[in-house]
Amino acid sequence: MAALTSLSFSSSFTQCCERKATVSSSTHRFFVSSSSEVFGFRTIFSYHYGGVRASCSSSKMVVQCMSSATDAPTVSETKLNFLKAYKRPIPSIYNTVLQELIVQQHLMRYKRSYRYDPVFALGFVTVYDQFMEGYPSDEDRDAIFKAYINALNEDPEQYRKDAQKLEEWARAQNLTSLVEFSSKDGEIEGILKDIAERAGKGDFSYSRFFAVGLFRLLELTNATEPTILDKLCAALNINKKSVDRDLDVYRNLLSKLVQAKELLKEYVEREKKKREERAEPQKANETITKCLGQQLSGQQLWSYENNIY
């Protein structure tokens, strides 16, 4: 993942330049489909701990999850499911973004045209792991991931399993075999062929998670030639301009994420130093009081002994 340090996803980090405990709020547009479906991101960061709180069938790792207007839960229900599943406080710099992401993924998840695929899962896992990198507890980070995916009525284990399979497959590919998947047989090749077929028929719901998943495949294949992404998009019948646009946003926003985390680190260190500085006079006073108490006790003992004699 080291080579991915130039990437990001959530627009919540677009204003991180003020070195204050609270970072300015900002709004960005988040395109989640080729049909220009737009959602807004608004995020306010404050450095404190905030208490926060389908039917799926599988074939060759391709899972179709469809929902109708009558059985789809509301956004509030999905958020409530997440809060019920993970009840511990989450630092607000993470929690605010998680709340925004789950709203947007809910809207993607319950579109009539939504269909889960492993490339989408790889994209989300990549985004999540990048965003949650440096979280205070690895155990809590995993628990939050499970609560998040379960709240969307999907399987967190399948997300992780599919992402891992794609990563292992990509590491074994070269530039040629990656883009010529249609001429080969195999589990992953079958997934990519299915995506290409649906995209060619206009039956594919594109999203930024998918774009990030594609980029992750290229990264693991060590594809450095700019034309490889062109060829892969052409083989998948995916609009290259949409992918370029989304990856540009993704790269830019990771830098904002890094800035935000640096600000948080500086704030925590500054507050720790202030607490230590405030504690020093208190310790000095306690030491003086203790010494005076010992001296007073000695004087009282001396006076008592003199009275005896």
Image (cartoon, grey):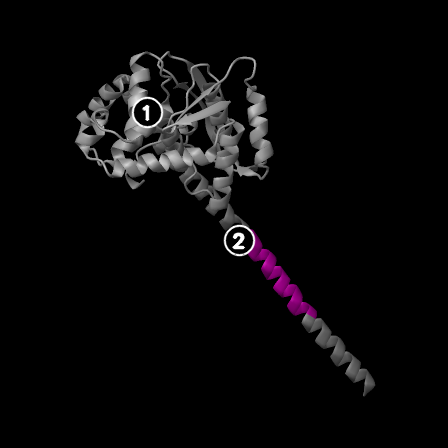
Dividing the image into 4 quarters, which one contains the C terminus?
bottom right
For the residues marked 1 and 2, what is the alpha-carbon distance in whole angstroms? 47 Å
Report helix, strand or loop for mark 1: helix
Q: Residues within 10 Å of mark 1 (few under 14, many from 20)?
A: many
Q: Which residues are magenta?
A: 278-293
* Residue projecting furthest to the right: 308
Regarding residue 76, the answer to whether it shows in the image is yes
Please report whichever mark, 1 or 2, sits nearer to the chain's N-terminal start: 1
* Residue projecting furthest to the bottom: 309
Residue 290, image x, y percentages: 66, 67
Residue 287, quarter of picture: bottom right
Looking at the picture, tell me which residue is in the foreground, 163 or 55.
Answer: 55
Residue 28 position (above or below residue 164): above
Tell how many labels: 2
Label 1 or label 2, whichever lies nearer to me, is 1
Regarding residue 53, the answer to whether it shows in the image is no
Residue 288, image x, y percentages: 63, 65
Q: Going 78% across and 84% down the picture, which residue do you hit?
A: 306
Q: Amino acid at mark 2?
A: Glu
Residue 277, image x, y percentages: 53, 52
Looking at the picture, tell me which residue is in the foreground, 11 or 121.
Answer: 121
Report whether 283 appears left or right of 163.
right
Residue 253, image x, y percentages: 36, 29
Which disc number belongs to residue 276? 2
Which disc number belongs to residue 211? 1
